[in-house]
Image: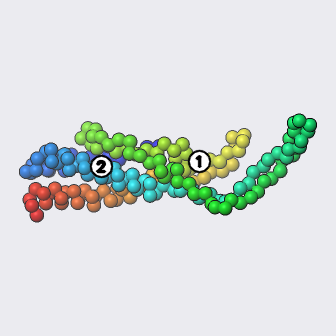
Amino acid sequence: MAKLIEFDYSEFSKFLNGLKLGQKDIDKRIEDFIYFIANRALDKMEEKTPVGVYSNSVHFKAFKVKAKGNGFNLGEYVNVDFETAQNKVGGNLRRNWRIVSVKKVNNKWVIELANNTEYAGWVNNGHRIVDKNKRTLGWVEGKFFVEIAMEEIEKELPIYVKKLQEDILKQMFGK
């Protein structure tokens, strides 16, 4: 599961080109800014990704085993129920977010985040519940944590861009 973030900074770059700050300085500041945004997006993805909390109740069916000579016979099913001392807490999905790449493509920076947990898409988007015969029994709603995290980053982005602009202008004019 991957999510791309695109940031077109061409107009800002044109504005800065007309000023005294060197192009290499501008490019370095923008690249540092993009890596900051990539890490901010990674933090946001991890923060919004749900963590499973599992009951300490355990339930399963097992065969009753009857000894027969040197072997055994499987008898009827019995229900086995017990409770563990602690609830299990997950976190595998949250721990598996990575920044895959940060690259400039056609004057746009592209940030790719990914989570290689096999069930990431199911938790995010929802999934159907099926029985052993593959009949649909119901639907589990998605958590949409990727979309929520991206919306939050998009809302924060103008604040970070303004700060970058102010910092560059301060550097250029010494204010």
Q: CA distance from mark 2 to mark 1?
A: 33 Å
> What SS does tag 2 mark?
helix
Horizontally, is 72 left or right of 98 in the view? right
Q: Nearer the viewer, residue 28 or 130?
A: 28
Asked if one can make out residue 125 in the rendered structure from this viewpoint, the answer is: no
Q: Nearer the viewer, residue 18 or 72?
A: 72
Q: Which label is found at residue 93?
A: none
* Residue 47 spot, x, y in % from top left: 44, 58
Horizontally, is 61 left or right of 102 in the view? right
* Residue 82 vertical placement versus 128 (above, below): below
* Residue 115 spot, x, y in % from top left: 46, 45
Horizontally, is 141 left or right of 3 in the view? right
**Which residue appears at 26% of the width and 38% of the height?**
106
The kind of residue tagged 2 is: Tyr
* Residue 170 spot, x, y in % from top left: 13, 60
Q: Which label is found at residue 35?
A: 2
**Which residue appears at 78% of the width and 53% of the height?**
80
The residue sitting at the right extreme is 69
The residue sitting at the front extreme is 70
* Residue 9 spot, x, y in % from top left: 23, 48
Image quarter where the C terminus lies is bottom left
> What SS does tag 1 mark?
strand
**Which residue appears at 18% of the width and 59% of the height?**
167
Q: Circle 1 sits on which residue?
A: 127
The kind of residue tagged 1 is: His
Task: Choose top left, top right, bottom left or bottom right for residue 88.
Answer: bottom right
